[in-house]
Every structure is written in structure tokens, then in C-alpha cells.
């Protein structure tokens, strides 16, 4: 098995995996595969942040991606960050650590590019292990109603979020307002 | 389980041998390696690790790859590093040794994943991102076989 940025072929193969992964998920709107397709058409899309885990037969077992976003303060000042979403693993391969490997891979890529911070919406018990912490104490808020503990950020550089505050503006593909 | 990130440096000499170290806290020979924090550049961490284990101030030759070990939730990042000219004649410490890079010689002293990493270098591979899905039983069996082999 290996992790690789998507090729057009792997990108197509990843979509049913993403749909399957979220088919029985509690916090799913059932549109994660559509979201990924929309993110792939975004002007800020970066294929190197669109990663799949493939086995030796080139079957896609998992997928995770980062998309560009911005924290925007009241006075209009903005800081670029990246959003980790969605993370999907095919049901038969779940709970084996594949998602963890994909997240670590993306973190390493983002870190190497000097990215300031990542944001994720999810379970603190899972994402806390990577160093994600609630965003609220930084003064960073979500553009939707969410429990503080589920809306998390992670600095990729020491002091990466010092002085950063405002509302997170997602890629327009998320269909949230305001948009990045 | 805690996530763990390690970084290792592969130093080769012109006799097709690889440098292994036997650190004070280790019971086995291994590549010079160290844990590193997520907020540390692996290319810097590997130079620190090799310096600590061998005393050599190395330069990065190339990034071999990362190995994600699912069972142990570790991420192993591996580089080929080069000692400064004139210092290729290490080992300079008693706790290091050169080992031939034949599959048999490597397998006699190193765990399978290290053999795989060094073999990847010999095959000229770089920029790999490998997932190792070792079930705990397969892993234990392998460790036992390695242990017996060393007796």
C-alpha cells in the first residue's frame, strides 16, 4: 500500500470510496463525494493536497484532502489556512489506522510548504492525537453553529496562529457563507 | 495510542555498506534515528539525529520516503545523508559499525522494515509514501523469526 497524490484515474476511483465511507456515518450529509468533486474544480485546488491510499492493485482504500481557506477578521485582515476535509476510508479498512496515515501525510506536505495552520471539524478524541485543539480560544470561529470542542485548529509552525482571529471562510465548494 | 514520528539517516560508503549505530537506550543495531515533533522539519531533525548518534555533521542527499506503520501509528521518514568529505572512514564511535547491504546481511541485524527502506535506496527509489499494514500477529511472528535468526 502507498499514499499518493491523485491522478485523474485515482481521483475518479476515490469518489465511490468516499460515498461508501460516509454511507453509515453519524455526522454525514451524504454529499461528501460531491464536495470532493466541487473542491477539485476550485480555483485554489492543489492536487498535491488531494491524497489517496492505494493498494498494490491500484484500488483506492482511502482518501483525504486539504482545501484553502482563510481566517478573516472584522477589519478585513485575512490569514490563509487549510481545511482538512473530508477524510474517508473504505468500510472494510476502517479502524486500522489508514485515516491516521493519510492525515499525517497531509500534515507533512503542508508543513513542508510552510503552511500556517490546519482546521478540522470532527471528533476531538480522534483529531486531538494529531495536536488539533479547539479553535475558539484563538478567537477563530466557524461560519456555522458547532460545539467548540468539534471545531479545531492545529498550528503547523510555532506561533502560527498568534494574532490570528476571525471567522473561518471555507472554499466556496463547501456552500457555506461567508466564503473564502 | 500516541502517534510517533521518527526520522532516520542512511549513510553509505563506497564499499556498498550502510552505517548502523547501537545507542545506549537500544538493544539492537539500527540506522541513526530519532523521534521528532510534528512542528520540526524532518530534514533538520535527521541531521540532528545523525549528529547525536555518530558525531557526523551530514548533508541531505535525498528524501527516500515515509513509511506509515498502521499497527504502531508511527511515521518513519528516511533520508540518505552524506558525511563531509574525508570522514567517510567512520565508524568513529565504538557504538557504530558498517554492514554489507546484501539482503542476508541486512536481515541478520535489522528488522524487515529497515531492510525494505535500505533496499529502496539501493533500487534508486525516492519520494515514496508507503503504508505498512502489519497485523499484530504477523508482526510478532516476524519479530520471533528475526530473534531466532540472530541466536
Image (spheres, rainbow, N blue to C red):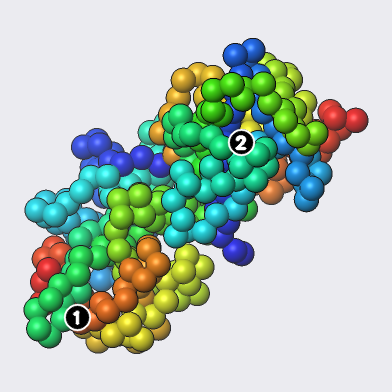
Q: Secondary structure at mark 1?
A: strand
The mark found on residue B56 in the picture is: 2
Image-based side of A8 in relation to B51, left or right: left
Q: Is residue A75 above or below residue B81?
A: below
- Local packing at callout 2 (Cα closer than 10 Å; few below 14, some 14-19, many 20+) is many
Residue B57 at x, y = what percent? 56, 37
- Is A33 left, or right, of B122 in this rendering? left
Which chain is home to disc 2?
B
Quadrant (top left, top right, bottom left, bottom right) of the C terminus of chain B: top right
Q: Is residue A26 visible?
A: no
Residue placed under numbered mark 1 in the picture:
A167
Give A16 or A140, whichever is nearer the viewer: A140
Task: Using the rendered image of the protein, determine whether residue B3 is visible from the camera's viewpoint.
Answer: yes
**Image point 59% across, 63% down: which residue?**
B2
Is A25 placed above or below A59 here?
below
Instruction: Report which quarter residue B141 is drawn in.
Output: top right
Instruction: Kindly indicate whether the residues beneath marks 1 and 2 are on one polypeptide chain.
Output: no
Residue A96 position in % (x across, y down):
54, 54
Q: Quadrant of residue A39?
A: bottom left
Q: Residue furthest front?
A: B86
Q: Label 1, label 2: how many angstroms apart (C-alpha)?
A: 48 Å
Amino acid at each position: 500500500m502507498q499514499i499518493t497524490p491523485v491522478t485523474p484515474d485515482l481521483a475518479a476511483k476515490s469518489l465511490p470510496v468516499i460515498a461508501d465511507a460516509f454511507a453509515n456515518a453519524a455526522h454525514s450529509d451524504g454529499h461528501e463525494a460531491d464536495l470532493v468533486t466541487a473542491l477539485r474544480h476550485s480555483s485554489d485546488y492543489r492536487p498535491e493536497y488531494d491524497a489517496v491510499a492505494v493498494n498494490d492493485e491500484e484500488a483506492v482504500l482511502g482518501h483525504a484532502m486539504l482545501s484553502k481557506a482563510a481566517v478573516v477578521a472584522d477589519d478585513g485582515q485575512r490569514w490563509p489556512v487549510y481545511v482538512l476535509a473530508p477524510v474517508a476510508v473504505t468500510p472494510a479498512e476502517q479502524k486500522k489506522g489508514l485515516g491516521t496515515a493519510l492525515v499525517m501525510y497531509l500534515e507533512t506536505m503542508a508543513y513542508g510548504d510552510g503552511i500556517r495552520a490546519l482546521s478540522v471539524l470532527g471528533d476531538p478524541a480522534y483529531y486531538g492525537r494529531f495536536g488539533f485543539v479547539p479553535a475558539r480560544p484563538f478567537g477563530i470561529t466557524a461560519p456555522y453553529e458547532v460545539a467548540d470542542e468539534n471545531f479545531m485548529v492545529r498550528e503547523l509552525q510555532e506561533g502560527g496562529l498568534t494574532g490570528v482571529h476571525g471567522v473561518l471562510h471555507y472554499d466556496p465548494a463547501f456552500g457555506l457563507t461567508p466564503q473564502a | 495510542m500516541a502517534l510517533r514520528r521518527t526520522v532516520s539517516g542512511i549513510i553509505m560508503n563506497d564499499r556498498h555498506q550502510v552505517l548502523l549505530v547501537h545507542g545506549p537506550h537500544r538493544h539492537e543495531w539500527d540506522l541513526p534515528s530519532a523521534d521528532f515533533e510534528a512542528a520540526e522539519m524532518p530534514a533538520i531533525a535527521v541531521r540532528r539525529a545523525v549528529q547525536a548518534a555518530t558525531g557526523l555533521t551530514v548533508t541531505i542527499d535525498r528524501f527516500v520516503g515515509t513509511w506509515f506503520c498502521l499497527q504502531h501509528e508511527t511515521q518513519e521518514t528516511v533520508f540518505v545523508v552524506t558525511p563531509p568529505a574525508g570522514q567517510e572512514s567512520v565508524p568513529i564511535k565504538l557504538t557504530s559499525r558498517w554492514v554489507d547491504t546484501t539482503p542476508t546481511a541486512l536481515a541478520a541485524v535489522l528488522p524487515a522494515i529497515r531492510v525494505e527502506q535500505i533496499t529502496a535506496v539501493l533500487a534508486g527509489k525516492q519520494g515514496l509514501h508507503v503504508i505498512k499494514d502489519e497485523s499484530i500477529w504477523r508482526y510478532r511472528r516476524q519479530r520471533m523469526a528475526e530473534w531466532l535468526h540472530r541466536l
